[in-house]
């Protein structure tokens, strides 16, 4: 363990605080603005109000966009976990030459610029006559976040090793019993972590969505279109709610991902 002098510790602590202030300080502005009126740079601390949240509740366009974003996020995350698990099981349990080609195909859309992935999907949907809608957005997001789910599950399966599966087979368990009672319980934390990260990427994805969306807008596209006219105070309320839900989601994910022995020792 490296021991630092008092001066070095103070310097590192100051730099850390500065970095946190730069990263998270701007988030305080919409939070404060959602409860208090800011006029010419001055916060009216003596007049708290929930009018921004009331306006948000009555903004049908924003609420519809949020609903579309949640539908796309949950659907794309679920699809990526199911398909990623199947492909990971094939990669870790097989010996076919096509496994490496499959892995390359999975990683390629994630490594390419999103605009290229979006254009490729747009051309595919246009040539095949598939109308753009939330379904095409779900496909685009699934293609984009698939690599993350797949790689996370593969690493977990490789860490398990074949001994547990071989022991289950030797004891007479069927492949389905081995998967549901041995493999799946060991993938629980991995699937939760992949779901959280995948949903976060889907929630924030703009470029692919912009190219493959139809008449139904997701929240990033809705906010993108509002930038030219400026944001109303209800957007500050929306940002505050999203931040609060994100913090809660992160806490739940961390508690699920922490090892049981570490949680008990804490």
Image (tube, rainbow, N blue to C red):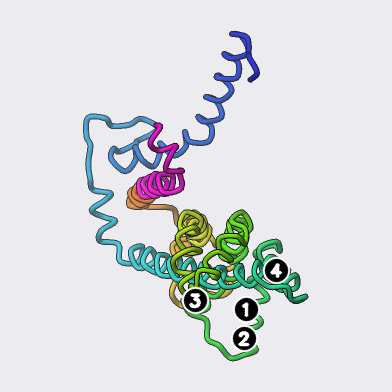
Chief secondary structure of the magenta portion? helix
Using residue 43 as the reference point, say whether residue 14 is left or right of it.
right
Task: Say which residue label 4 marks.
Answer: 103
Check disc 4: other Cα within 10 Å, few if <14, some if 14-19, many if 20+: some
Q: Which residue is mark 2?
A: 126
In front of the other: label 3 or label 4? Answer: 3
- Comes first in the chain, label 4 or label 1: 4
Image depth: mark 4 or mark 2 in front = 4
Label count reads 4
Magenta span of residues: 243-266
Q: Residue visible at 75% across and 70% down?
A: 100
Q: In x, y percent, where is residue 199? A: 48, 60
Please, is residue 178 above or below residue 151 in the view? below
Between marks 4 and 1, how big is the CA–CA gap? 23 Å
The tag earlier along the polypeptide, 3 or 2, is: 2
Pinpoint residue 125: horizontal percent, then vertical percent. Answer: 60, 84
Mark 3 sits on what residue?
A: 174
Task: Name which quarter of the figure residue 218 lies in.
Answer: bottom left
Report, in whole angstroms, how far the alpha carbon at label 3 lies from the one at label 1.
Answer: 43 Å
Q: Is residue 54 magenta?
A: no
**Of pointers 3 and 1, the one earlier in the residue sequence:** 1
């Amino acid at each position: 363990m490296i021991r630092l002098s008092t001066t070095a510790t103070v310097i590192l602590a100051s730099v850390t605080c500065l970095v946190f202030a730069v990263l998270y300080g701007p988030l305080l502005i919409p939070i404060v603005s959602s409860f208090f009126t800011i006029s010419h740079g001055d916060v009216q601390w003596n007049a708290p109000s929930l009018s921004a949240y009331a306006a948000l509740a009555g903004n049908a366009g924003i609420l519809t966009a949020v609903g579309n974003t949640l539908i796309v996020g949950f659907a794309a995350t679920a699809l990526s976990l199911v398909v990623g698990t199947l492909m990971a099981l094939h990669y870790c349990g097989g010996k076919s030459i096509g496994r490496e080609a499959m892995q390359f195909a999975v990683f390629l859309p994630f490594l390419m610029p999103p605009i290229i992935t979006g254009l490729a999907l747009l051309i595919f949907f246009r040539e095949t006559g598939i109308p753009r809608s939330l379904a095409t957005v779900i496909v685009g997001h699934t293609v984009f976040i698939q690599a993350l789910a797949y790689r996370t599950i593969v690493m977990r399966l490789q860490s398990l090793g074949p001994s547990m599966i071989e022991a289950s087979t030797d004891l007479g368990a069927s492949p389905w019993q081995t998967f549901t009672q041995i493999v799946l319980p060991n993938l629980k934390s991995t699937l939760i972590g992949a779901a959280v990260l995948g949903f976060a990427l889907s929630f924030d994805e703009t470029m692919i969505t912009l190219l493959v969306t139809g008449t139904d807008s997701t929240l990033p596209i809705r906010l993108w279109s509002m930038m030219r006219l400026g944001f109303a105070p209800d957007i500050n309320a929306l940002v505050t709610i999203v931040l609060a839900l994100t913090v809660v989601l992160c806490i739940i994910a961390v508690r699920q991902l922490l090892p049981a022995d570490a949680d008990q020792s804490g």
